Image (cartoon, rainbow, N blue to C red):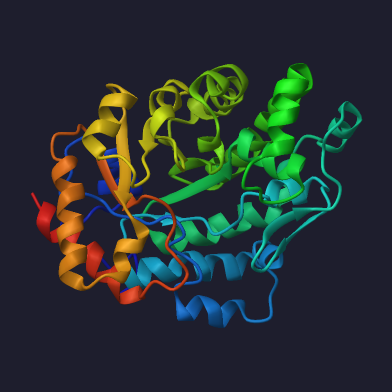
């Protein structure tokens, strides 16, 4: 069944979907479900269409992006699609020499560590990412009433890749720059905030119904460092897209101590990883925000009854929240059984039907 072939009584536009209602903290027919990295390596159909195509190349082919983005919607019946891309795509689009190396991640040929390096970070234009506009047009036509989530990497996480030259466990060069040259650091994050906001604007103007800002590595920071050195740039991104009226989601890994500050940065929805119960996460985030999360992705490798039990714990912790979007506490792991994800969607929908 395509996204447009819906039973009578189902939403006919993304605005009326359970996902967007939950983002707006409105009553929902059931708790909506989607998964970070739902389109990707866990699906055999994804591996088949990506065969022989480099990751960044696949992000620049509108028809391929459309197919990959749709795959989990068709298979799992999730309540939202997330645009298939990578957080470094806008950096590649403005001419940064980088590649995504299998088993490693994004690798930057010449790290950015001096003021002279800032000149390499020019503004992003819609023409730089024309393929995003084209792919989202194809997707929204096919998705019908199912919302599409656009996304981007947050300034801190992008800065970490650029300064380190690739993934890092300890972020030594990043923190050395942040502490050692705070003025250069602030200018770097401000430049990245403009690039990130530009990338989100392209997606929203093309038809995305919501956007998520991924700050994957920000959990490496203490709250005082986040408030002083990161939050201004994140806030700038959220303010830049506020006028569009689409829900803005903020997510990071290992951010239990930062949740309140992440809420202050300006998102409408804050995601929590699996390390903190959702009721406590909501208390830390503060009122007026929906909460997203937060089943441990590794739970999906356990027997079905164990998955059901842990799912119940998440739903129980979320029972009193104003708005809850069910998700994992991080992305779908590559070796996850796709059928486990399908069962999880059905289980959450059934248990929370109103």
Q: Which residue lies furthest to the right in this view?
A: 116
Name the spot of residue 162 as percent of width and height, x first.
75, 42
**Which residue is at 79% across, 45% downward?**
94
Name the spot of residue 272 as percent of width and height, x first.
36, 40
Q: Which of 75 and 275 is in front in this view?
A: 275
Q: Which of 224 and 139 is in front in this view?
A: 224
Q: Residue furthest left?
A: 354
12 relative position to 157: left or right: left
Name the spot of residue 246 as percent of width and height, x first.
43, 35
Choose top left, top right, bottom left or bottom right for residue 231: top right
Would residue 5 be visible to someone looking at this image? yes
**Which residue is at 67% across, 57% downward?**
131
Name the spot of residue 59 as percent of width and height, x first.
65, 62
Establish if 285 lies above or below 126.
above
Choose top left, top right, bottom left or bottom right for residue 269: top left
* Number of marks in the rendered image: 0
132 relative position to 341: left or right: right
Q: In which quarter of the image is the N terminus?
A: bottom left
Q: Nearer the viewer, residue 51 or 206?
A: 51
Establish if 169 lies above or below 346.
above
Would residue 24 be visible to someone looking at this image? no
202 relative position to 262: left or right: right
Establish if 169 lies above or below 4.
above
**Which residue is at 76% across, 21% downward?**
180
**Which residue is at 63% across, 34% downward?**
155
280 relative position to 273: left or right: left
Establish if 187 lies above or below 215.
above
């Amino acid at each position: 069944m395509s996204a447009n072939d819906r039973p009578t009584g189902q939403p006919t536009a993304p605005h009326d979907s359970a996902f967007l209602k939950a983002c707006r903290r409105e009553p929902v027919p059931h708790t909506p479900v989607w998964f970070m990295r739902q389109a990707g390596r866990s699906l055999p159909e994804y591996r088949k269409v990506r065969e022989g195509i480099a990751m960044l190349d696949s992000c620049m082919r509108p028809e391929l992006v459309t197919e990959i983005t749709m795959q989990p919607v068709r298979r799992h019946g999730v309540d939202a699609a997330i645009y298939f891309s990578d957080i470094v795509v806008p950096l590649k689009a403005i001419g940064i020499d980088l590649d995504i190396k299998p088993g490693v991640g994004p690798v930057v040929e010449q790290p950015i560590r001096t003021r002279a390096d800032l000149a390499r970070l020019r503004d992003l234009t819609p023409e730089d990412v024309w393929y995003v506009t084209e792919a989202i047009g194809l997707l929204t036509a096919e998705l019908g009433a199912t919302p599409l989530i656009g996304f981007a990497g947050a300034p801190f996480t992008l800065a970490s890749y650029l300064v380190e030259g690739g993934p890092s466990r300890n972020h030594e060069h990043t923190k050395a720059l942040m502490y050692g040259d705070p003025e250069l650091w602030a200018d770097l994050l401000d430049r990245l905030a403009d690039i990130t906001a530009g990338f989100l604007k392209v997606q929203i103007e093309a038809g995305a119904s919501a956007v998520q800002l991924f700050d994957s590595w920000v959990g490496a920071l203490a709250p005082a460092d986040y408030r002083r050195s990161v939050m201004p740039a994140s806030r700038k991104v959220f303010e830049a897209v506020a006028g569009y009226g689409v829900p803005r989601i903020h997510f990071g890994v290992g951010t239990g101590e930062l949740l309140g500050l992440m809420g202050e940065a300006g998102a409408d929805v804050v995601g929590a990883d699996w390390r903190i119960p959702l009721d406590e996460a909501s208390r830390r985030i503060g009122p007026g925000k929906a909460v997203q999360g937060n089943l441990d992705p590794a739970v999906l490798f356990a027997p079905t009854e164990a998955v059901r039990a842990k799912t119940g714990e998440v739903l129980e912790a979320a029972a009193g929240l104003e708005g809850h979007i069910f998700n994992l506490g991080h992305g779908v792991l590559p070796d996850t059984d796709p059928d486990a994800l399908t069962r999880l969607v059905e289980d959450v929908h059934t248990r929370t039907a109103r």
